[in-house]
């Protein structure tokens, strides 16, 4: 895949060695957080976009401490049109 590509995994991809390889090759990846994902927060980014639905934005280290880990970013967002239907 060429550098600057974006890969989206809908079901929570968790092959951390592959995700690290993508990152080192300049490929951006997005995956759904699965409940079994353990992570440590390295930094909280300033959040000036709360009105746009961004609840939190954090720099993380994903994975169990005893396994391969991957550095990433976790953003919790609310998409207003979906929130309307999901809360009904």
Image (cartoon, helix red, strand yellow):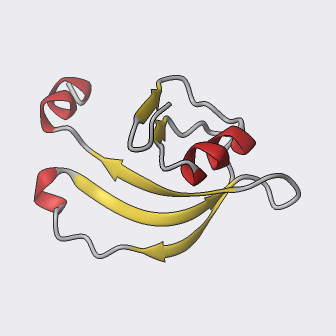
Dividing the picture into quadrants, the one containing residue 51 is bottom left
> Left or right of 67: which side holds 11?
left
Residue 82 on image: x %, y %: 20, 28
Q: Is residue 52 left or right of residue 1?
A: left
Where is residue 16? Give x, y as percent: 71, 43
Residue drawn at x 14%, y 38% as measured from the top left:
80
Rendered view: 33 above or below 76 = above
Give whichever of 36, 19 is nearer the camera. 19
The residue lying at 71 percent from left, 36 percent from top is: 15
Along the line of sight, the residue nearer the viewer: 38 or 86: 38
At which x and y percent is residue 57?
37, 62
Q: Residue at x 25, y 43 (%)?
A: 78
- Which residue: 36% across, 73% down? 45
| For residue 26, above or below residue 80 | below
Q: Quadrant of residue 86?
A: top left
Q: Is residue 41 above or below residue 4?
A: below
Location of residue 76 in the rendering, given as x and y in whole percent from the top left corner:
36, 51
Left/right of residue 3 with respect to residue 63 in the rendered view: left
């Amino acid at each position: 895949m060429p550098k600057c590509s974006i890969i989206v995994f809908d079901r929570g991809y968790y092959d951390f060695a592959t995700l690290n390889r993508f990152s080192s090759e300049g490929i951006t990846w997005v995956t759904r957080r699965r409940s079994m994902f353990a992570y440590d927060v390295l930094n909280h980014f300033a959040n000036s976009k709360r009105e746009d639905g961004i609840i939190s934005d954090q720099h993380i280290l994903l994975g169990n401490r005893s396994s391969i880990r991957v550095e990433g970013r976790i953003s919790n967002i609310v998409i207003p049109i979906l929130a309307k239907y999901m809360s009904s």
